[in-house]
Image: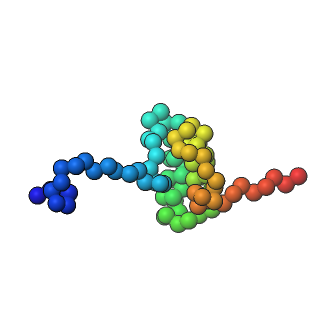
């Protein structure tokens, strides 16, 4: 029995997801930020805490800086924009 309908032997061409999949950090460039974020999530028991969102931004910014993911606006990543500087 085959996974292809009709037992067709043609190759399936997978398509990558739009979001949710990006290169691994083989060099460990963002390991510190990732560990801080995961520790925060553990401390707040998975709640959506503002301090954890700041750590998530640091982690994602590190990934963007090291070209491990495409640069995108925070609102598209589900995070608030940075507050404007007050003078």
Q: Percent position (x, y) of residue 37?
A: 54, 52
Task: Identify the residue shown where x is 58% and y is 57%.
Answer: 77
Left or right: where does residue 51 sit relative to residue 21?
A: right
Identity of the residue furthest to the left in this view: 1
Relative to 7, does residue 24 appear above or below in the rendering?
above
Q: Quadrant of the N terminus?
A: bottom left
Determine if residue 18 is in view: yes
> Between residues 3 and 6, which one lies in front from this camera angle?
6
Task: Identify the residue shown where x is 43% and y is 54%.
Answer: 17
Task: Identify the residue shown where x is 44% and y is 50%.
Answer: 21
Q: Percent position (x, y) of residue 35?
A: 50, 47
> Between residues 70 and 2, which one lies in front from this camera angle?
2
> Between residues 2 and 28, which one lies in front from this camera angle?
2
Quarter location, residue 26: top left
Q: Percent position (x, y) of residue 65?
A: 60, 39
Relative to 17, does residue 45 appear above or below in the rendering?
below
Left or right: where does residue 76 sit relative to residue 7?
A: right
> Between residues 76 and 1, which one lies in front from this camera angle?
1
């Amino acid at each position: 029995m085959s996974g292809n309908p009709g037992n067709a032997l043609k190759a399936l061409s997978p398509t990558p997801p739009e979001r949710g999949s990006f290169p691994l950090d083989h060099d460990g460039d963002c390991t510190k930020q990732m560990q801080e974020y995961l520790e925060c999530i553990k401390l707040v028991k998975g709640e959506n805490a503002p301090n954890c969102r700041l750590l998530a931004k640091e982690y994602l910014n590190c990934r963007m800086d090291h070209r491990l993911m495409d640069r995108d606006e925070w609102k598209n990543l589900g995070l608030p924009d940075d507050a404007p500087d007050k003078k």
